Image (cartoon, rainbow, N blue to C red):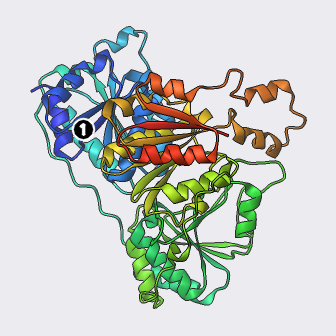
Amino acid sequence: MNGAESLVRTMVGAGVEVSFTNPGTSEMHFVAALDRVDGMRCVLCLFEGGATGAADGYARMADKPAATLLHLGPGMANGLANIHNARRARSPMVNIVGEHASFHRRFDAPLTTDIEALARPLSHWVRTGANAMTIAQDGADAIHAASNPPGQIATLILPADTAWGEGSGPVATRPPRARGKVADEVVRDIARIMTTQQNVMLMVGGVALREKPLMDASRIVRKVGARLMAPGANARVARGAGRVSVDRVPYPVDLAVEALKDVRHMVLVGAKPPVGFFGYPGKPSAMTHPDCVFHVLADEDQDLADALARLADEIGAAGIAPDYPERIARPDIPTGARLDADSIGAVLGALMPEQAIICDESVTTGRNFFAMTKAAAPHDWLQLMGGAIGEGIPLATGAAVACPDRKVINLQADGSGMYTLQSLWTQAREKLDVLTLIWANRSYAILKGELANVGAENPGRKAHDMLSLDNPALDWVSLAKGMGVEASRVETIDGLAKAMRGALSRQGPCLIEVVI
């Protein structure tokens, strides 16, 4: 058994069952091993950013790592943007990056790069395999590192000769460390703050945004009269009718400052103090009042659910009913209405199916979708975490691989969708149940607002041309069909509702271009 097969069998034995791949020559022995070993699903992606984005979506829904297979340094570089997003989402990921055979590196062939230097800034763990007999142990260590809470990026660099040489056979992987328990005195201190202070906010993030922890968070704030909020972007939120509704910190600085202006004590649970996405002339970077004091109940690598449950017990909130949006009527479909963000949000809220997975890279168009869908059927909402656009379509791809029995809906801005549209081909090849809704406003609309926010005065033709996706207009219907995905274009709210009903009634990938 060679090193590559030893490594693949180690991965399968540790529960790494999916590899999102874009291989090259140096990875061919690994590719051959994938074919010989049962239990590893191989999903071909036509761009490395599609592979790393899909691995992020898979991890968020499966709660365990997938592998990526990338070709040398340039392949790693192509995947880095969505590795950055996955790192911010705290998604576990095992990157296998091919490398030249160890004896060949000194000849400085055209694809030679310092892969470790590329990987290290965005990886929590990096190692270059030394030989074929130890590469399986390297893989076991990578999986252990990736699986440690709250989820980490592990990058194993695989020289070709460590793959083709005689290997050790599979090795066992150590279990990840458990999430740490919050100390009793911390719970008591936070309980005292929440029961004695005024203008308190509970800011919850990470896995505290799953269904059960949110119920405890709601009980706590109802008991003490505090407010509950989530960060502006979150890896996964359990929401919908019958689940606790939590508002997010707004993206625009002025709105965020207004929303948080009265908060004087902010209790953080798997979250950080809210700051602006960018710095702007004359505007603050911190979104909270200067007098706000921050208190940490639990860091993101600790047991957030346990901490909230114990805090609820400590303040006597365990018997209080959470605040559910059941009493809020689901929005009606606005027949004949103008096609805009509000009417689209109403259609989404009305038609979203039970247990849908929403992958949101709407950027500008979808800023109000979250509020308008809180009484939709129960669902999970996934967002772009690191701000590096181009993850929406791959994220939906990975989520659909992880949860084949659930409908995935990708809310996708047209500009950012162009970064990784190759993932539509992967959806077609794998017959994934994904509905992609493209908001075709023919521009980088968010940047038009940013132009004013940063004080760039009197922008001219060149500036406007850099923000326009018109002349020629992108034809998403043709792009999707060219990659094997059924597609249509709508220009009215009635057309959108009809097209969505049709798409939601069928299995398999579908795209609707919504011209705004």
Q: Quadrant of the C terminus?
A: top right
Residue annotated with mark 1: 139
The percent position of residue 187, horizontal first and vertical second, equals 46, 81
Q: Residue furthest front?
A: 336
Disc 1 crowd rating (10 Å Cα; few below 14, some 14-19, many 20+) is: many
Left or right of 94, for residue 48 = right
Nearer-the-camera pick, 213 or 141: 213
Question: Above or below — where is 85 with respect to 68?
Answer: below
Compared with residue 467, is residue 455 higher up or lower down, i.e. above or below? below
Q: Is residue 160 visible?
A: yes
Q: Nearer the viewer, residue 37 or 172?
A: 37
Give the tally of numbered discs: 1
Relative side of 457 to 73, left or right: right
Describe the element under mark 1 as helix, strand or loop. helix
- Return the x and y of residue 393 as percentages of the image width and height: 47, 38
In this rendering, does residue 92 appear at all?
no
